[in-house]
Amino acid sequence: MFSIALLNAQSVESRIAPPAGYVREACEQSSYTVYLRRLPLLPQGSKVLLYNGKEKRNQAAAFAVVDMEIGNRDLLQCADAVIRLRAEYLWAQKRYDEIKFNFTSGFKAEYKKWADGNRIKVNGNAVQWYASGGRDYSYQTFRKYLDIVFMYAGTASLSKELVPVPYASLKPGDVFIIGGSPGHVVIVVDVAVHPQTGKKVFLLAQSYMPAQQIHILVNPANRKLSPWYELSDTDEGKLYTPEWVFGKKDLKRFAL
């Protein structure tokens, strides 16, 4: 857990300046965009660590590492990172009703039910709620809820929850996702625009397998622009990230 009020800490916004001529667009202080921009970063040069404390093999994929605990189990993989960031934002905003994610089985895990004292029993594909304890909206209980979601959700289930959006409408919080086993997902954490030309650039972040710290990605296709990616005018073509290739049509977002 962290506070978006920690402006003195190194963050995406404070460390990663837009390319020359580009500016970050103004937005509401309570928005998801601001939350993502203010994700705290570990000191420059920090290695991406796995859940077990070992270093990620491909360190070249990362431009910076997000300062967020990931637990000591192999849970926070790619889809889980997207779920984690959205859930953390909504929890901080006390928008508890909106924190809900589907398991691969189709079961809807609603945080509010969990916080009101219910727990989830899984037996194969049979999943059900049962009463256990009292009402508790603490962060510790919220974090335990997330671990259950991480365990039973993935790119296959997350992809079905999201709605496709045109590539040109890309905004922070959107994801490029291919659901399946294997599948992968990366999240847009910031966008900047050129006031004169209207062109846009964006930043991406991911976790991966095995579970590892969330990290801002380099741009392997344009080292001069890296870590920013250029938003083109067409939905056609590919998006090349360090460890996965997406189609530009693979862009989705959470429905409002």
Image (tube, rainbow, N blue to C red):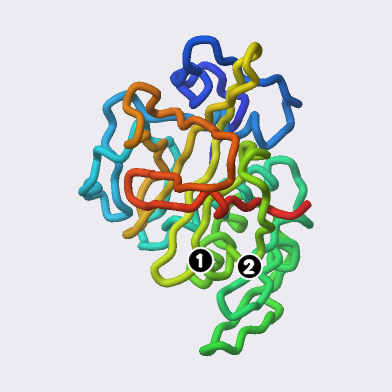
**Which residue is under mark 1?**
179
Residue 139 percent coordinates (x, y): 61, 49
Q: Quadrant of the N terminus?
A: top right
* Residues packed near mark 2 inside 10 Å, few (<14), some (14 to 19) or many (20 plus): some
* SS under mark 1: loop
Separation (CA) of disc 1 from disc 2: 8 Å
Please, is residue 179 above or below residue 99 in the view?
A: below
**Neighbour class for label 1 at 10 Å: few (<14), some, many (≥20)?**
some
Of residue 39 and residue 208, the one placed in the foreground of this image is: 208
Side of 104 relative to 165 (left or right): left
Q: Residue at x 53, y 69 (%)?
A: 156
Callout 2, which amino acid? Lys
Q: How many marks?
A: 2
Q: Which residue is at a point 77% across and 48% down the rendered structure image?
A: 95
Badge number at residue 160: 2
| Residue 134, visible in the rendered structure | yes
The structure residue drawn at horizontal position 37% and vertical position 30%, both measured from the top left corner, is: 42
